Amino acid sequence: MRIAVDAMGGDYAPEAIIHGGVEAARFGKGEYEVVFVGDESIIKTHLFRHFRIQELPVQTHHAANKIEMGESPTAAVKRKPDASINVAMALHKQGKVDGVVSAGHTGAAMASAFLNLGRIEHVKRPAIGSLIPHGQGTSLLIDVGANLECRPDHLLQFGVMGNIYIKNVYDLASPRVGLLNIGEEETKGDDVVRQAYQLLSQSDLNFVGNVEGRDVMSGLVDVIVCNGFVGNIVLKFAESFNGVYSKTLKRKIGKKVFSNIGAFLLKPTFERLRRIYDYEEYGGAPLLGINGTCVVCHGSSTPKAIKHAVIEAAMMIKRNVNQKIRNELTGMMEEERHAE
């Protein structure tokens, strides 16, 4: 399999992106090939700085342009067909690569995926899922920004797609699915959420009911369903936790001798805690419902985050996540027709 990496997208591009892609290629041990898309002369300059790069499954594909973070996503995607994210998506559409990873403009990556790849059959709204770490593992929060307003049937499909992703990429036999709400009772929330509760309850999902904000990082459920407006706020709050935790810890320890001795002894424990809540450990956010494999990374992604994003994309391809979404939604549509 071949995975295109947008080498020009991200706050630390191209160096951090190329470094992460190279490390992913080393980790894969030939299972997949990494194709860096962007200015070929710049990419090759960075590639040649890496040890024994000639032995790795790494290729380049030229793209003459890139989309800047401040640009309007849809307009820029249409205006710049030669931008690196557009070229990567075009390669995917043509079957020359099997997936795309980008840490560039999130809106541009979404717009390019929609325009180039389209939706999987029967998907009404593609959604972005983001992994939320907790003490026992991770939960998938879906949607986190693609759809600010949703219908009940959209939320049902988010649950279905999130369930398939978590089941296959994280090897969970029966993921617990929850609906993010302001209370546990099924009567809570607005009309959309209450109707979505009924649809999820009647589905074949392992639906455990409503979950509240305090449950997001508790590990109570494996898939948390919400609209993109709420999900994006929750995600940005969760992303701040690691930085706040580290700063608060340093401030509380201060310069006291005994505090520093205790901190030194507990350093391995603190490091384990930091890693649990570090987004770099979890790669990127899968764009589910698109007729292709797309992983969107944080703009400030480090090489470690890019490496994990490429590994995540490879796992999605290997486990046929898109085909399973297609099969599940086709079956649901057939059941609805028979019920009519």
Image (cartoon, rainbow, N blue to C red):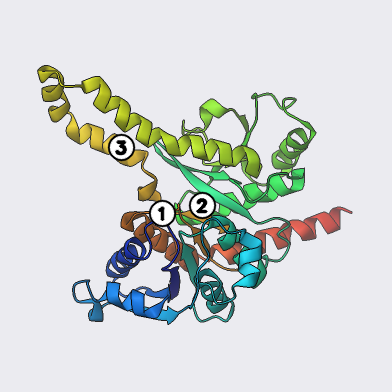
As measured in the structure, the alpha-carbon distance from the residue carrying label 1 to the one carrying label 2 is: 17 Å
**Quadrant of the image for the C terminus?**
bottom right
Question: Circle 1 is placed at which residue position?
Answer: 283
**Could you tell me residue 322's position as x and y percent?**
58, 64
Amino acid type indicated by mark 1:
Gly
- Front-lying residue, 129 or 326: 129
**Quadrant of the image for the N terminus?**
bottom left
- Front-lying residue, 103 or 304: 103
Residue found at x 50% / y 32%:
220
The part of the image, by quadrant, that contains residue 302 is bottom left
Residue found at x 54% / y 36%:
234
For marks 3 and 1, the one nearer the N-term is 3
- Front-lying residue, 214 or 207: 214
Question: Circle 2 is placed at which residue position?
Answer: 167
Q: Secondary structure at mark 1?
A: loop
Residue found at x 48% / y 60%:
104
As measured in the structure, the alpha-carbon distance from the residue carrying label 3 to the one carrying label 2 is: 26 Å
**Could you tell me residue 109's position as x and y percent?**
56, 62
User: Position of 291 compared to 222: left or right?
Assistant: right
User: Position of 124 compared to 23: left or right?
Assistant: right
Amino acid type indicated by mark 3:
Arg
Q: Secondary structure at mark 2?
A: helix
For marks 3 and 2, the one nearer the N-term is 2
As measured in the structure, the alpha-carbon distance from the residue carrying label 3 to the one carrying label 1 is: 16 Å
